[in-house]
Image (tube, grey):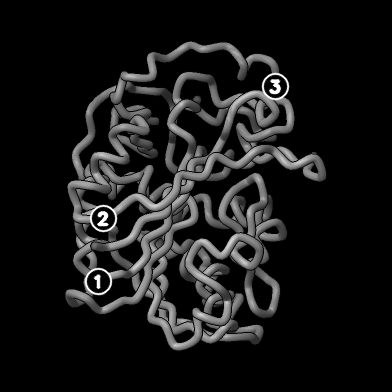
Amino acid sequence: MPHEDPADPHAQATALLGTSAIARTRVDSTSSARANRRWWDADAAQYHDEHAAFLGVDSPDGEFVWCPEGLHEGDWHLLGDIGDLHGKRILEVGCGSAPCARWLAAHGAYPVGLDLSRGMLERGLAAMARGGPRVPLVQAGAEELPFADASFDAACSSFGAVPFVADSARVMREVARVLRPGGRWVFSVNHPMRWIFPDDPGPDGLRATMPYFDRTPYVEVDADGTPTYVEHHRTLGDRIGEIVAAGLTLIDLIEPEWPEWLDQEWGQWSPLRGEIFPGTAIFVTEKR
C-alpha cells in the first residue's frame, strides 16, 4: 500500500518520488527498471536505518543473511561448504549494499556484486571504505547481465532483483548463461503465497484479499500515473517453470519457519504471521 504514514520507514522515498496511489497494471521491463532504480536510490538511507544491523552491512566482513527469518549462509551452506568457496567466482544479483558479497570475499571467494541502484551500491562502498574485504560492484539490471558466458562458478540473490523485474524468466536464462556447468544459483524471494495477504504484520495481514493466480504487478504511482515502485508476482509453479526452461535443475526449495528466538518485525514479516505461513521461498538450483 502507499507509504503515507510519516512514521513509515519508507516515508522519505514516498515523499521524494511523490507516490500518491496504487495502480494494478501491467508494466514493461523498461518502466519497471526505471521505477525501481529511482525507488531504491530514494529509499537507500531509510532502508539501512532500519535493516543494516540485521543484515550486517556495517560489520567488518559483512554477513550473508538469506531472509527476514534470519537464515545465515554460514549455517545453511546453500552455496556449498565454506571451505569450498575459496577461489570461486560468485555473482551476487541485486546485491544492494553488498554485505553478502563481502562475507563471501572474507571466506576466500571472488564475488562481484551487481545492483540496479547507485544509492544502494554507494552504501556498500561506504561500508567497504571503513575496512574489511573489498569487492567489485557493478550497476546494471538483472535482465541483461554484462558478463561473458560461463564466467562464474556460482550465483546468488538474497531478496534482490528477482521480484522487481518484469521478465524474471529472462533473469533465469541470463544467470544460466553466465554460470559454468555445475554452477549453483540460489535465490530467495517473498514466498508467493504472501501475495494473497495485505502487507501487514498484524491481524489484518492474516486475511486473504488477493487471488494467488492474479499476476498483475503491484504498482505505486505518482500524481501523473508514473510508476514509482513495482513488484511482480509469480506462483511457485511459475518460478519452477522458469528455472527448468533456463536449463537449470531445482535441487531444493526451502520455506523457512519463523525461529523462536526472533521477535523482530520486518515490514510484513512478523512472529504472528511467521507461525502460520511462510514468508520466504529459497530456490536452490544448478546448471545442467
Q: Position of residue 169 (x, y in %)?
A: 22, 46
Which label number is shown at residue 202? 3
Q: Position of residue 104 (x, y in %)?
A: 53, 76
Q: Position of residue 46 (x, y in %)?
A: 61, 51
Please tell me how crowded label 3 is: few (under 14), some (14-19), or many (20+) other residues with Cα within 10 Å: some
Q: Is residue 48 shown left or right of residue 182? A: right
The residue at 63%/85% (across/down) is: 132
The residue at 42%/71% (across/down) is: 113
The residue at 70%/21% (across/down) is: 202
- Residue 30 in sight from this viewpoint: no
**Helix, strand or loop for disc 1:** strand
Q: Quadrant of the C terminus?
A: bottom left
Badge 2 is on which residue?
248
Q: Quadrant of residue 229?
A: top left
Badge 1 is on which residue?
181
Look at label 2 and name its amino acid: Leu
Of callouts 1 and 3, the N-terminal one: 1
Of callouts 2 and 1, the N-terminal one: 1
Q: In the image, is residue 245 above or below residue 223?
A: below
Look at label 3 and name its amino acid: Gly
Q: In the image, is residue 284 above or below residue 258?
A: below
